[in-house]
Amino acid sequence: MIPDYMVVIPSYKRADVCNTKTLKMLKENKINKDKIMVYVANKEEETEYLKVLDKNLYHKIIIGKKGLVPQRQFIMEQFH
């Protein structure tokens, strides 16, 4: 079943900002963490984000593509 909506966050080298600003704002606005996925560029980024992000603020980290346009295309393909 396809969820009614998901919040996908493409992020690169901004783990602290993602945690303290983006994810915090989503929590403050009562967005269910199960609806939130963070997309990173590679395994190294995933390792860094896993260290920094509060696991209570997101559902999953997914390794996608490096670069905003390729990452957006990758994300779109995940939901088609």
Image (spheres, rainbow, N blue to C red):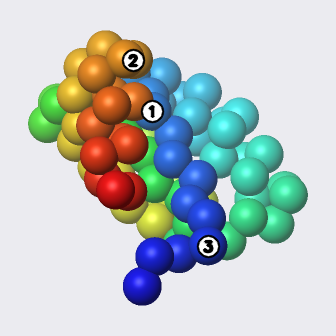
Label whose residue precedes the other's in the sequence (1 or 3): 3
Q: Is residue 80 above or below residue 14?
A: below
Closer to the camera in the image, 57 or 73: 73
Residue 33 lies in quadrant: bottom right
The residue shown at (37%, 17%) is 69
Residue 64 in view in this figure: yes
Residue 4 is tagged as 3
Q: Residue furthest right?
A: 29
- Disc 2 crowd, CA 10 A, few/some/many (<14, 14-19, 20+): few
Q: 51 left or right of 26?
A: left
Label 1 is placed on what type of residue? Pro
Residue 50 in view in this figure: no
Label 3 is placed on what type of residue? Asp
State the image coordinates of residue 43 (x, y, percent, origin top left): 14, 36
State which mark lies toward you, 1 or 3: 3
Q: Which residue is mark 1?
A: 10
Residue 68 is tagged as 2
State the image coordinates of residue 19 (x, y, percent, origin top left): 58, 40
Instruction: Calculate the distance from the C-alpha at mark 1 to the C-alpha at mark 3.
Output: 20 Å
The residue shown at (34%, 56%) is 80
Instruction: Calculate the distance from the C-alpha at mark 1 to the C-alpha at mark 2.
Output: 7 Å
- Disc 1 crowd, CA 10 A, few/some/many (<14, 14-19, 20+): many
Instruction: Calculate the distance from the C-alpha at mark 3 to the C-alpha at mark 2.
Output: 24 Å
**Split into 4 quadrants, where in the image is the N terminus?**
bottom left
Residue 41 lies in quadrant: top left
The residue shown at (61%, 65%) is 5
Q: Callout 3: helix, strand or loop?
A: loop
Q: Is residue 64 above or below residue 54?
A: above
Q: Callout 2: helix, strand or loop?
A: helix
Circles 1 and 2, Cβ within 8 Å, touching? The answer is yes
